[in-house]
Image (spheres, grey):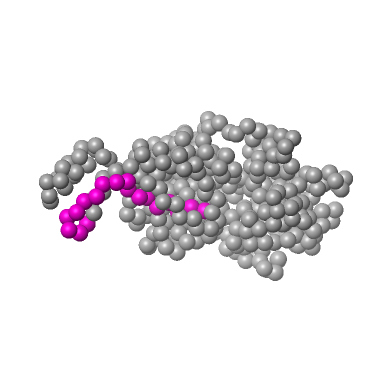
Amino acid sequence: MTRRARTVAALCLAGALSAGCTLAGGGGQQEQGPVTVTLATHDSWNAPQEVLTEFEQRSGIRIKILKEGDAGELTNKLVLAKDDPIADVAYGVDSTFASRALAAGVFEPYTSPEADRGPQRYAIDRQHRLSAVDVGDVCVNIDRQWFAERDLPEPETYADLADPEYRGLLVVQNPATSSPGLAFLLGTIARYGEEGWQDYWSRLRDNGVLTVSGWEEAYTQEFSGSSGEGPRPIVVSYASSPANEIGEDGRPRTKALLETCYRQVEYAGVLAGGDQVDSAGKVVDFLLSQEFQATVAEHMYVYPAREGVPLPAGWAEAAPLPEDPASLPSERVEAEREHWVEQWRALLNQ
């Protein structure tokens, strides 16, 4: 080890450079600079660059973002690559798919010092392999103007969606390929039970429900209440979606039907077998920090898991979080998910 190398190593051991120290292999050469932690996440990831830069300058950790589709696709990739992880941290595995990732051993235990500031309310794993980052309950959304122009009463419940009065108006996502689609299916199972949900879906099918592969297609192309101005005024989306549809009059053009909501929580965790375990834990801490949590509502249109984080103006009126959303035990979802999806495919001829 050269004199310079010994000096750098000593500084690292003293904590002067903390995570900002790296030792490059080969030829005894050493480099200084930020440690890079790869964060695998979904396509909806969005955070202000200045917040990421401030974290990097403070911690010596640079976050490299790897977008891997929606929550379902992300989970599938993490499971398939669990012996050779594609990243150091994952964010976006949600409560409908978390049991699959946990059963496959994708994450390793890590308890963040920030986890008792609110995320503990959504704990899903006794080994603390996942920490809740945000809440984005899945609910049916409607285009209020569409109904007002036709003097048609707005639907309110699951039962209304199967009423012939609303024939051909609903678009949903395929639960085999879409996280909100799976959440909606689970919501109908929670509402109608094992004995009744297939009959309910048969009535939706006969009432002209349209199924598409993912949220983007359903909301931005088929739904009439958003930018796509599609033909259908009823769509499966999120409780917080109306906050993105506030018009010039300050009122949302859309509305979430709070009797059709299924609780969906997104989690982050340290990937087992990664090369940057300690730094990966610090990234989880960052995702749960007040600094990052203050950005999730405005940038990803979901609710922060941390308590006491201010929300953007108008959210309380435009996008209230449901008080009593449906949910199913994660163990039951893990045991029955594939079976339910196959039954759904048979019913809908998908």
Q: Residue furthest right?
A: 151
**Is residue 156 visible in the rendered structure shown here?**
yes
Q: Residue at x 82, y 46 (%)?
A: 147
In the picture, residue 55 is in which quadrant? top left
Residue positioned 45% across, 52% down in the render? 65
| Residue 201, position as x, y percentages in the image | 73, 59
Q: Nearer the viewer, residue 275 or 261?
A: 275
Which residue is pictured at 33% across the width and 51% down the height? 276
Say whether residue 45 is left or right of residue 280.
Answer: right
The answer to whether residue 173 is above or below residue 133 is below
Q: Is residue 228 magenta?
A: no
Horizontal side of residue 235 vs 301, given as left or right: right
> Residue 77 in the image: x percent, y percent?
47, 61
Q: Quadrant of the C terminus?
A: bottom right
Percent across and percent down for residue 79 are: 45, 61
The residue shown at (65%, 42%) is 244
Indicate whether 137 appears above or below 184: above
Q: Which residues, given as a range, are shown in magenta?
A: 25-42
- As drawn, 275 above or below 137: below
Q: Is residue 40 magenta?
A: yes
Q: Is residue 332 left or right of residue 261?
A: left
